[in-house]
């Protein structure tokens, strides 16, 4: 499936960048369901905040947005 290939490439890019304030990846083995965690930057009103996102990619991704 084209969507699985695109998602796999984007996952590799996210892993390569390795941000200290942001992590994301598939939940278990489901490539179409990701969890992301964002930590608030120091010196901002969001400092010490931890924000979790639950991301679901549709089968026609990238032509339709994730939910």
Image (cartoon, rainbow, N blue to C red):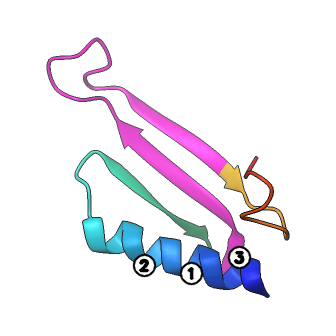
Q: Where does the image place residue 23, in percent across and percent down from the top left?
A: 39, 56
Other residues around mark 3 within 10 Å, as few (<14) / some (14–19) / many (≥20): few
Left or right, 34 with respect to 21, comes to right
Asked if 10 appears above or below 65 in the picture, the reply is below
> Which residue is at 49% across, 73% downward?
11
Which image quadrant is residue 50 in?
top left
Residue 35 magenta: yes
As drawn, the residue found furthest toward the left would be 43
Give SS at disc 1: helix
Left or right, 6 with respect to 39, comes to right
> Which residue is at 65% across, 48% downward?
54
Q: Are marks 1 and 2 in contact (CB under 8 Å)?
A: yes
> Which residue is at 27% across, 66% downward?
17
> Which residue is at 82% across, 62% downward?
58
Q: Earlier in the sequence, mark 3 or mark 1?
A: 1
Q: Where does the image place residue 10, in percent across and percent down from the top left?
A: 50, 71
Question: Distance between the Cα atoms at labels 1 and 2?
Answer: 6 Å
Other residues around mark 1 within 10 Å, as few (<14) / some (14–19) / many (≥20): some
Residue named by callout 2 = 12
Which image quadrant is residue 6 in?
bottom right
Left or right, 61 with respect to 26, comes to right
Magenta span of residues: 28-54
Residue named by callout 3 = 30
Asked if 4 appears above or below 46 in the picture, the reply is below
User: How many numbered callouts?
Assistant: 3
Give SS at disc 2: helix
């Amino acid at each position: 499936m084209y969507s699985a290939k695109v998602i796999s490439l984007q996952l590799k890019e996210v892993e390569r960048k390795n941000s200290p304030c942001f992590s994301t990846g598939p939940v278990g083995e489901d490539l179409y369901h990701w969890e992301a965690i964002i930590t608030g930057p120091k010196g901002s009103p969001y400092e010490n905040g931890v924000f979790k996102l639950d991301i679901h990619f549709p089968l026609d991704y990238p032509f339709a947005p994730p939910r």
